[in-house]
């Protein structure tokens, strides 16, 4: 247990600076976008949605609804993807070099990823709640419907839970991809390219439909409990598959 705790502390210490820098840049960007929206008065900076309504005099009026903090989600996904893609090249060899077992490293990675997603969800959840207040203070219309959330009616805890689930799934997926790349390197991309070329030249309706059906099932929001169960189950399966590639993999440093 002590070895696992040390592993988690090591990974958290490794990402602490990156998280601080990331959010400093994101929050600075949000402030800039609020300033630009206030000075230009056209609501073009951030996630927006245009709705056409009929005014009292019968004219059609375009009304733009805006959410600046919502655009942070893509940046968070990119951060999660990049971290999981490089973790096995930068952290795994160091951890094993300091006598950590593969099991402790992998369990530490799962716990670290969960903490990372929770941190991201808490900060983004607070920013999403503040966003509505700021947008209205600027005299513009706030976009309340965002992803699976109604920001006007749900509380901050609900927002954080949904965001955590939205972040944890790509975290597990790209952790798996990171393990595959660490094991096979460029060979994976050769196989991927060959498979893409083959599928591009044959009938792909069946696999495409199957993939669409699976993705629609996973990402369909049919209640918090059901969505949570699906997300956690799929994430657990992805981590289980990733362990297959890590448990006997020799340590290497070259990409």
Image (cartoon, helix red, strand yellow):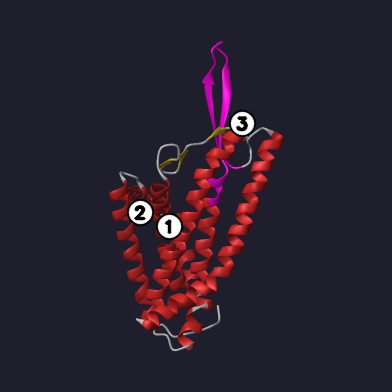
Cβ–Cβ under 8 Å for marks 1 and 2: yes
Residue at x-position 58% and y-position 39%: 134
Looking at the picture, tell me which residue is in the foreground, 118 or 95: 118
Mark yes or no: residue 234 visible: yes
Q: Secondary structure at mark 2?
A: helix
Q: CA distance from mark 2 to mark 3?
A: 48 Å
Is residue 235 found inside the magenta-colored segment of the image?
no
Looking at the picture, tell me which residue is in the foreground, 117 or 217: 117
Mark yes or no: residue 102 visible: no
Q: Which residue is mark 3?
A: 139
Badge count? 3
Q: Secondary structure at mark 3?
A: loop
Q: Which residue is mark 2?
A: 207
Dot in front, 1 or 2: 2
Q: Which residue is mark 1?
A: 199
In the image, which residues are magenta? 46-72
Q: Residue 234: where, in percent of width, then height? A: 32, 60
| Label 2 or label 3, whichever comes before in sequence order | 3
Q: Secondary structure at mark 1?
A: helix
Q: CA distance from mark 3 to mark 1?
A: 51 Å
Looking at the picture, tell me which residue is in the foreground, 236 or 108: 108
Dot in front, 3 or 1: 3
């Amino acid at each position: 247990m002590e070895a696992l705790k040390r592993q988690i502390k090591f990974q958290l210490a490794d990402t602490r600076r990156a998280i601080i820098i990331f959010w400093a840049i994101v929050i600075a960007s949000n402030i800039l976008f609020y300033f630009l929206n206030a000075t230009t008065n056209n609501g073009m900076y951030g996630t927006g949605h245009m709705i056409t309504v009929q005014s009292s005099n019968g004219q059609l009026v375009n009304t733009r609804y805006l959410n600046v903090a919502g655009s942070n989600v893509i940046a968070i996904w990119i951060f999660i993807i990049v971290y999981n893609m490089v973790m096995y090249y930068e952290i795994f060899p160091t951890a094993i070099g300091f006598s950590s077992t593969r099991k402790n490293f992998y369990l530490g990675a799962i716990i670290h990823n969960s903490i990372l997603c929770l941190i991201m969800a808490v900060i983004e959840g607070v920013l999403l709640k503040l966003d509505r207040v700021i947008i209205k203070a600027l005299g513009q219309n706030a976009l309340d419907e965002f992803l699976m959330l109604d920001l006007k009616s749900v509380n901050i805890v609900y927002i954080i839970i949904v965001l955590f689930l939205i972040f944890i799934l790509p975290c597990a997926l790209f952790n798996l991809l990171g393990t595959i790349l660490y094991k096979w390197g460029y060979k994976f991309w050769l196989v991927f390219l060959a498979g893409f070329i083959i599928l591009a030249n044959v009938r792909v309706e069946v696999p495409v439909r199957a993939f669409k059906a699976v993705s629609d099932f996973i990402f369909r929001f049919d209640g918090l409990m059901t969505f949570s169960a699906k997300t956690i189950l799929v994430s657990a399966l992805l981590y289980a598959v990733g362990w297959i590639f890590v448990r006997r993999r020799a340590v290497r440093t070259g990409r």
